């Protein structure tokens, strides 16, 4: 036996729900990766600043 066919309203609702879920997941992934990239950039900048500070010669 075949399951009953979905009417057009149900199909549209499922499509909209799928797009919403995909968008929410995409937003979460974007925020996580963006935060990780920002943290990496801050860490690298801190290293550069500390390196420049420890290798700088005091002016006489």
Image (tube, grey):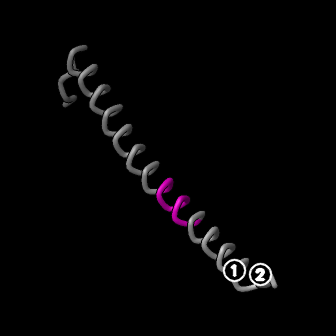
Quadrant in the rendering for residue 5:
top left
Placement of 39 over or under 22, stated as above or below: below
Q: Is residue 36 magenta?
A: yes
Q: Residue at x 57, y 71 (%)?
A: 43
C-alpha separation, residue under disc 2 versus residue under disc 1: 5 Å
Residue 53 or 34: which is nearer the viewer? 53
- Provide residue 21's location: percent of width, then percent of height: 31, 39
In contact (CB < 8 Å): disc 2 and disc 1: yes
Q: How dense is the environment of label 1, judged by Cα within 10 Å: few (below 14), some, or many (20 and up)?
A: few
Q: Indicate the quadrant containing the N terminus: top left, top right, bottom left or bottom right.
A: top left
Q: Determine the secondary structure under disc 1.
A: helix
Q: Determine the secondary structure under disc 2.
A: loop
* Magenta region, residue range: 33-40
Residue receiving disc 2: 56
- State the residue lying farthest toward the front: 60
Residue receiving disc 1: 53
- Provide residue 29's location: percent of width, then percent of height: 43, 51
Placement of 5 over or under 42, stated as above or below: above
Residue 48 or 11: which is nearer the viewer? 48
Q: Residue at x 43, y 56 (%)?
A: 32
């Amino acid at each position: 036996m075949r399951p009953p066919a979905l009417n057009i309203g149900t199909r549209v609702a499922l499509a909209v729900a799928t797009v919403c879920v995909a968008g929410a997941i995409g937003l979460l992934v974007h925020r996580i990766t963006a935060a990780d990239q920002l943290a990496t950039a801050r860490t690298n900048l801190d290293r550069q600043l500390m390196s420049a500070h420890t290798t700088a010669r005091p002016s006489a």
